[in-house]
Image (spheres, rainbow, N blue to C red):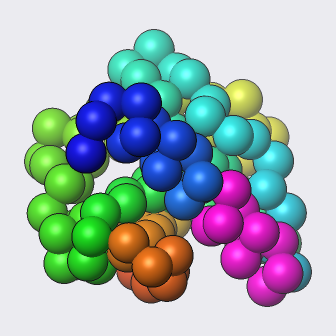
């Protein structure tokens, strides 16, 4: 996939995932939030819990999942720590890390608490 096409497919995937979380009653409070270590695609709230969401788009869900590297996970953890520093509960704020896999047909699979495994 060309760079421009890949970029636009990724953006479309982020919008679709945001809509899914919104329809499920969660509030998306940040898009492409940037901390010192890098960017988090989406940040949502479910009550008091903060959900950090990494969106991966590819031809299949399996291929999308393969695009998440340990280095990216470390970057997301570090940026999430920056974000939580601004929360009233700080690092003790209930939080989780979801991965949203989007395939070439636009189907979305959410892996809740994906970094815990």
Image check: 83 left or right of 71?
A: right
- Quarter of the image for the N terminus: give it: top left
Direction from residue 83 to residue 68 in the image, left or right: left
Vertical side of 31 occupied by 99: above or below: below
State how many labels appear: 0
Q: Nearer the viewer, residue 98 or 93?
A: 98
Which residue: 48% across, 30% down? Answer: 39
Is residue 23 inside the magenta stretch? Answer: yes
Residue drawn at (51%, 76%), measured in percent from left and top? 106
The spot of residue 17 in percent (x, y) is: 62, 67
Image location of residue 103, percent across then percent down: 37, 74
In this picture, residue 108 sits left or right of residue 31: left
Q: Nearer the viewer, residue 24 or 50?
A: 24
Quadrant of the rendered image containing residue 71: top left
Q: Is residue 50 visible?
A: no
Residue 99 % position (x, y): 41, 67
The residue range painted magenta reads: 15-24
Magenta stretch holds residue 99? no
The single residue placed furthest to the top in the displayed view is 36
Name the dominant secondary structure of the magenta segment. helix
Q: Quadrant of residue 15?
A: bottom right
- Image quadrant where one finds the C terminus: bottom left
Q: Position of residue 85 (x, y in %)?
A: 62, 30
**Residue 106 visible here:** yes
The residue located at (45%, 79%) in the rendering is 105
């Amino acid at each position: 996939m060309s760079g421009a096409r890949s970029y636009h497919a990724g953006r479309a995937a982020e919008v679709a995932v945001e809509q899914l979380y919104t329809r499920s009653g969660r509030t998306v409070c940040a898009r492409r939030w940037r901390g010192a270590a890098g960017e988090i695609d989406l940040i949502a709230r479910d009550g008091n819990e903060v959900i950090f969401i990494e969106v991966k788009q590819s031809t299949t869900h399996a291929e999308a999942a393969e695009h998440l590297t340990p280095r990216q996970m470390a970057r997301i953890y570090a940026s999430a720590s920056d974000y939580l520093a601004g929360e009233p509960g700080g690092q003790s704020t209930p939080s989780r890390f979801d991965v949203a896999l989007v395939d070439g047909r636009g189907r979305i699979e959410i892996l809740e608490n994906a970094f815990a495994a």
